[in-house]
Image (spheres, rainbow, N blue to C red):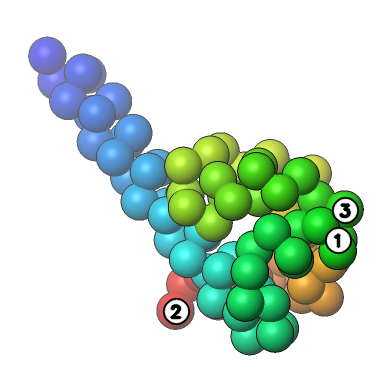
Amino acid sequence: MEQAKKHRESDHDFDLFKEKIGKTLKRLREERGYTNYENFAFENNIARSQYGKYEKGSEDLRLSSLFKVLNAMNISFEDFFKEVGK
């Protein structure tokens, strides 16, 4: 029972982390003048539907995808995670 509880807590914590990542991506995109995530994704050759899921926090973001998104936003991993921590 205890292990199942820890697993549920871990899943919940990860879901919250994904949501925080998504909110940060959205805020940074908007700060760069993109009011629509689809335009940002299209202009930077990122799958629009996938990127939308990242911003919603409903999809697990691979490091290679995060690298591509952050390059398009011209932000380093270090600076991005500082933003996530705010």
Gap in angstroms between the C-alphas marked 3 and 1: 4 Å
Q: Residue at x 32, y 45 (%)?
A: 13
**Residue 9 % position (x, y):** 24, 36
Checking the image for residue 44, the label placed there is 1
| Amino acid tagged 2 | Lys
**Residue 53 % position (x, y):** 55, 45
Q: Is residue 81 above or below residue 4?
A: below
Checking the image for residue 86, the label placed there is 2
Lateral position of residue 60 relative to residue 32, left or right: left
Residue that label 3 marks: 45
Q: Which residue is at the front of the view, 7 or 12? A: 12
**Residue 52 % position (x, y):** 59, 51
Checking the image for residue 1, the label placed there is none
**Number of other residues with Cα within 10 Å of mark 1, as a class: few under 14, some 14 to 19, many 20 or more:** some
Q: Which residue is at the front of the view, 33 or 19? A: 33
Asked which secondary structure carries label 1, the reply is: loop
Query: Disc 2 or 1, which lies upstream in sequence?
Result: 1
**Number of other residues with Cα within 10 Å of mark 2, as a class: few under 14, some 14 to 19, many 20 or more:** few
